[in-house]
C-alpha cells in the first residue's frame, strides 16, 4: 500500500466529462422558442395595437412599433367604451368579476379542503360512494344544468346577482377542488392524523392546526386554478349575470359586439388586455409556486 | 400506574378479520413486547387499544376503567409511531406541547413538562427547530418526548426504531429501557426485531395471524417455545429442526431422527408423547457443541459440514443431516472444521424442544 503524495497523472478519460451541445438539446430549444413565439406574437400585436391611434392602425403595418404610444385607448376601454346603451367601459365588469371571484375562490377551496380532508381521514360508511358521486359531478357538462338552474335562480330571486354567481362557481368548483385536496392528502401519513387524535385534537382542530398548515402547496394550486378559471368564465357570467352582475368577460364580449361603424381595434385590444390582466398577473406572480405545488409529491415529516 | 386488559377483542377490515376474540392481560408496570411477522395484526391491536381502530367485539379496560368507547385522548395512553408522525409545521417545542395546549393546561406547567421531557431525552437544544431539520434519531426522540409529556399510564410503541440505522437503534433501545425503569409505566411495544424483543421485554407475546401463539418471559419464549412457529420465528440463525419418530415414550424417552437414536432423559415434557408419534426435534444452533469436554452433553449426532461463516465474535457452521440443514454457532476459537467433512456434534437433552409433527405444539 502506498499513499499518494503528489498529483497523479492519469491516462485516458479522467475528471469531469466534457459537456457537449447535443443535437437533442438544439432541437429542444428550437421547439421551445417556436412555441414561445407562437404565443407571444399575438400578445405583442395586442399591446402595440392598443398603444396606437386609429390613423396608424389604418396603415396596416401590424407589427410596426407605435410612433406615438398613448394610453388613450386604454382609458376609453376602461371607462368609456359602450356596451349597448351604457358607455362605462369594462370597469363595472372588473368590479363584478372581483366580487364574484374572491368569495367563490375562498368558498370552493375551503370547502374542497374540508371535504377532501373528511374523505381522507374521517372515512364513514359510504364515504367512498359519496366521493365517487362528487367526482362524477366534475364530469357533468354544465350545459345540461343551465336551464334548470336558471329556473331555480329565478324563483329564488337570485338571478342576475353577484351572490348567485358565487354560489354557481362554488358548487361547480367543489368536485375538482375536493379531488385535488384528497389526492394531496393521500400523501400525508395517516399516523400523523392518529398522533393528533391521541393528542386530543378533534375534527376541526386537526383540520386547522395540522392539516391546513401542511397543505400550502395544494392550496396555492387550487387557488390559482379556481381564480383563473372563475375570472375567465364566460358561460356562467353570460347566463346568470343578467344585466347588473355581468363579469368582465361577458362585458368585454358585449362591448366588442356592440361597436358599430369603424372597429376601434386599439380600444378592443386594450379592453381585451385589461380583462386578461388579472389571470396573467396571477400566473406571473405565482407560476413558480404553481409548478412546485403540482409536482409536490410526498410530505416530509 | 395502570394495568391493561383486552377481553375478547375482534377487529375486521370489511370482510377481512384481523383479530378474533383476542384476550390479553398486561399487569401494571410491565413491558410487553408484541412480536410477530409482518401483517399479523400487531399495529391493529395497538390501534385498537389506543382507540384509533373500531373493534367489532370485546372490551378494552385500562386501569380498571372500561375505555372501549372512549376517545383516544381520554384513555390515558400515549403512542409513538414508526414514521415519527411529527407535526411538520410546528417547532419541536410545539410538537411536545401540543397535547397539553389542546388540554388547556396552564402555560407554566406546559413549559415545565416540555423541558423535563426534553432533558430526559437530551433534545433541549432542538426545541426551536422544525422536524425537517432533525436527523432520524432526533426525530424519534422527539416522538418519544411527545409521548412522555402526556404523562400517560400506558405507553404504546409501534415499531419506533425500525426506521433507524443499526447503531441508533441500539442507542435508543437502551434509552427506552432506561425510561421504562424510571417512569415505571405499563408499556406495550410492537416490533419484529427479535433483539429488541428479547432485550426490552418483561414478557413477549408472539403473534401470528392475529392469534397469540405464546405469552411468556423472553427466556421462556426462547428456551421453551410453545409451538413450531414460535421456535422458528425467534432466534437467528433459527432453531434447527429434525423430523423423527418417538421410539419409546416410557420413563426413558427415545426419539429416532432418521437413523440416529437420541435418548432424551433430561427433557422436560409438557405433554405425553406416545410411541410411534411423528415429532420434530428442535435444538438451538448455540446449543450444539463440537468438543467433547462439555459436561452433561448426553446426545450425539454426526453431520456433514457444508460451509462456514465467521461473524467476528462467533462462527456459524452450516451442515447437513439427512437432507436437513443444521446451523451450529460456535466461538471463533472453537476447533477448526473442514468443509465437506463429517462432524460429530454433542448436546444436552435438556436443551432440546419436541413438537408434535401434526399439531406443531410442544410435547
Ligand atoms: N386499513 C386497512 N384496511 C384493510 N386491511 C388492513 C388495513 N390495515 C391493515 N390491514 C390488514 O390487516 C392485517 C394486519 O395489519 P397490521 O398493520 O396490524 O399488521 P402488522 O402486524 O402491524 O404488520 P407490520 O409488521 O408490517 O407493521 C394485514 O393483513 C393488513 O393487510
Ligand atoms: Mg405495523
Image (spheres, rainbow, N blue to C red):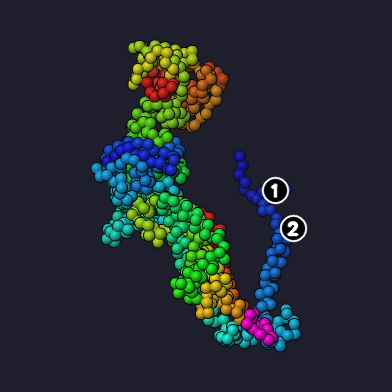
Locate the C terminus of chain A by quadrant. bottom left
Q: Residue at x 34, y 46 (%)?
A: B50
Q: Quadrant of residue B56?
A: top left
Seen from the viewer's position, the closer of residues A184 and A166 is A166
**Residue A257 in view of the camera:** yes
Q: Residue at x 71, y 66 (%)?
A: A34
On screen, residue A232 versus residue B280, left or right, reads right
Which chain does the residue under circle 1 lie in?
A
- Residue denoted by label 1: A10
Residue A59: image x %, image y %?
Answer: 75, 85
Q: Is mark 2 within 8 Å of ligand 1?
A: no
- Residue denoted by label 2: A23
Q: Residue at x 57, y 76 (%)?
A: A250
Residue B47: image x %, image y %?
Answer: 37, 45
Locate the N terminus of chain A by quadrant. top right
Q: Residue at x 62, y 87 (%)?
A: A72
Q: Which residues are magenta?
A: A257-271
Residue A263: within the magenta?
A: yes
Seen from the viewer's position, the closer of residues B82 and B70 is B70
Seen from the viewer's position, the closer of residues B176 and B125 is B176
* For discs 2 and 1, the disc positioned in front in the rendered view: 2
Can you say whether B333 is above or below A4 in the image?
A: above
Residue A208: image x %, image y %?
Answer: 40, 61
Which chain does the residue under circle 2 lie in?
A
Residue B205: within the magenta?
A: no
Residue B40: image x %, image y %?
Answer: 43, 37
Question: How many labels sit on residues?
Answer: 2
Label 1 residue SS:
loop
**Quick one: label 2 or label 1, which is nearer the N terminus?**
1
- C-alpha separation, residue under disc 2 versus residue under disc 1: 30 Å
Seen from the viewer's position, the closer of residues A215 and B164 is A215
Amino acid at each position: 500500500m502506498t499513499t499518494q503524495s503528489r498529483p497523479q497523472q492519469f491516462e485516458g478519460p479522467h475528471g469531469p466529462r466534457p459537456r457537449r451541445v447535443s443535437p437533442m438539446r438544439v432541437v429542444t430549444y428550437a421547439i421551445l422558442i417556436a412555441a414561445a413565439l407562437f404565443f407571444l406574437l399575438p400578445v405583442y400585436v395586442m399591446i402595440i395595437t392598443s398603444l396606437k391611434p386609429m390613423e396608424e392602425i389604418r396603415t396596416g403595418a401590424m407589427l410596426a412599433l407605435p410612433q406615438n404610444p398613448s394610453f388613450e385607448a386604454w382609458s376609453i376601454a376602461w371607462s368609456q367604451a359602450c356596451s349597448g346603451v351604457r358607455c362605462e367601459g369594462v370597469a363595472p365588469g372588473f368590479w363584478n368579476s372581483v366580487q364574484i371571484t374572491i368569495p367563490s375562490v375562498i368558498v370552493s377551496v375551503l370547502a374542497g379542503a374540508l371535504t377532501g380532508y373528511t374523505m381522507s381521514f374521517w372515512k364513514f360508511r359510504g364515504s367512498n360512494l359519496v366521493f365517487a358521486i362528487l367526482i362524477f359531478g366534475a364530469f357533468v357538462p354544465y350545459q345540461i344544468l343551465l336551464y334548470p338552474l336558471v329556473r331555480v335562480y329565478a324563483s329564488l330571486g337570485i338571478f342576475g346577482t353577484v351572490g348567485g354567481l358565487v354560489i354557481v362557481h362554488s358548487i361547480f368548483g367543489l368536485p375538482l377542488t375536493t379531488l385535488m385536496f384528497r389526492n394531496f392528502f393521500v400523501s400525508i401519513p395517516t399516523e400523523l392524523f392518529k398522533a393528533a387524535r391521541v393528542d386530543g385534537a378533534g375534527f376541526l382542530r386537526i383540520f386547522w392546526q395540522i392539516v391546513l398548515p401542511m397543505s400550502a402547496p395544494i392550496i396555492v394550486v387550487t387557488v390559482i386554478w379556481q381564480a383563473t378559471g372563475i375570472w375567465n368564465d364566460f358561460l356562467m357570467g353570460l347566463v346568470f349575470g343578467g344585466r347588473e352582475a355581468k363579469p368582465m368577460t361577458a362585458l368585454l364580449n358585449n362591448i366588442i359586439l356592440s361597436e358599430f361603424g369603424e372597429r376601434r381595434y386599439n380600444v378592443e385590444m386594450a379592453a381585451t388586455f385589461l380583462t386578461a390582466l388579472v389571470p396573467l398577473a396571477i400566473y406571473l406572480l405565482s407560476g413558480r409556486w404553481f409548478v412546485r405545488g403540482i409536482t409536490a409529491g410526498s410530505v416530509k415529516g | 400506574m395502570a394495568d391493561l386488559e383486552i377481553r375478547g377483542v375482534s377487529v375486521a377490515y370489511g370482510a377481512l378479520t384481523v383479530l378474533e376474540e383476542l384476550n390479553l392481560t398486561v399487569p401494571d408496570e410491565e413491558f410487553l413486547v408484541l412480536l410477530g411477522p409482518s401483517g399479523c395484526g400487531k399495529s391493529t391491536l395497538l390501534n385498537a387499544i389506543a382507540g384509533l381502530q373500531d373493534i367489532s367485539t370485546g372490551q378494552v379496560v385500562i386501569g380498571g376503567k372500561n375505555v372501549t368507547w372512549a376517545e383516544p385522548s381520554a384513555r390515558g395512553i400515549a403512542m409513538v409511531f414508526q414514521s415519527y408522525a411529527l407535526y411538520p409545521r410546528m417547532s419541536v417545542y410545539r410538537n411536545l406541547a401540543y397535547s397539553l395546549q389542546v388540554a388547556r393546561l396552564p402555560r407554566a406547567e406546559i413549559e415545565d413538562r416540555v423541558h423535563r421531557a426534553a432533558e430526559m431525552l437530551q433534545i433541549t437544544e432542538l426545541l426551536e427547530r422544525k422536524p425537517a431539520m432533525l436527523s432520524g434519531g432526533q426525530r424519534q426522540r422527539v416522538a418519544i418526548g411527545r409521548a412522555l409529556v402526556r404523562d400517560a399510564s400506558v405507553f404504546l410503541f409501534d415499531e419506533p426504531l425500525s426506521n433507524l440505522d443499526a447503531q441508533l437503534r441500539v442507542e435508543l433501545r437502551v434509552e427506552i429501557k432506561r425510561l421504562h425503569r424510571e417512569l415505571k409505566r405499563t408499556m406495550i411495544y410492537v416490533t419484529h426485531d427479535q433483539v429488541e424483543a428479547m432485550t426490552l421485554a418483561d414478557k413477549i407475546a408472539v403473534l401470528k395471524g392475529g392469534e397469540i401463539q405464546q405469552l411468556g418471559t423472553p427466556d421462556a419464549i426462547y428456551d421453551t417455545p410453545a409451538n413450531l412457529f414460535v421456535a422458528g420465528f425467534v432466534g437467528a440463525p433459527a432453531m434447527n429442526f429434525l423430523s423423527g419418530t418417538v421410539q419409546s415414550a416410557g420413563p426413558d424417552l427415545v426419539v429416532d431422527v432418521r437413523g440416529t437414536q437420541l435418548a432424551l432423559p433430561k427433557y422436560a415434557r409438557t405433554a405425553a408423547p406416545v410411541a410411534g408419534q411423528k415429532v420434530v426435534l428442535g435444538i438451538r444452533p448455540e446449543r450444539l457443541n463440537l468438543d467433547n469436554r462439555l459436561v452433561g452433553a448426553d446426545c450425539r449426532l454426526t453431520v456433514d459440514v457444508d460451509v462456514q461463516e465467521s461473524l467476528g465474535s462467533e462462527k456459524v457452521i452450516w451442515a447437513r443431516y439427512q437432507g436437513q440443514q443444521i446451523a451450529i454457532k460456535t466461538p471463533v476459537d472453537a476447533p477448526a472444521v473442514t468443509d465437506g467433512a463429517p462432524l460429530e456434534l454433542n448436546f444436552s437433552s435438556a436443551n432440546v424442544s419436541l413438537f408434535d409433527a401434526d399439531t406443531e405444539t410442544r410435547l
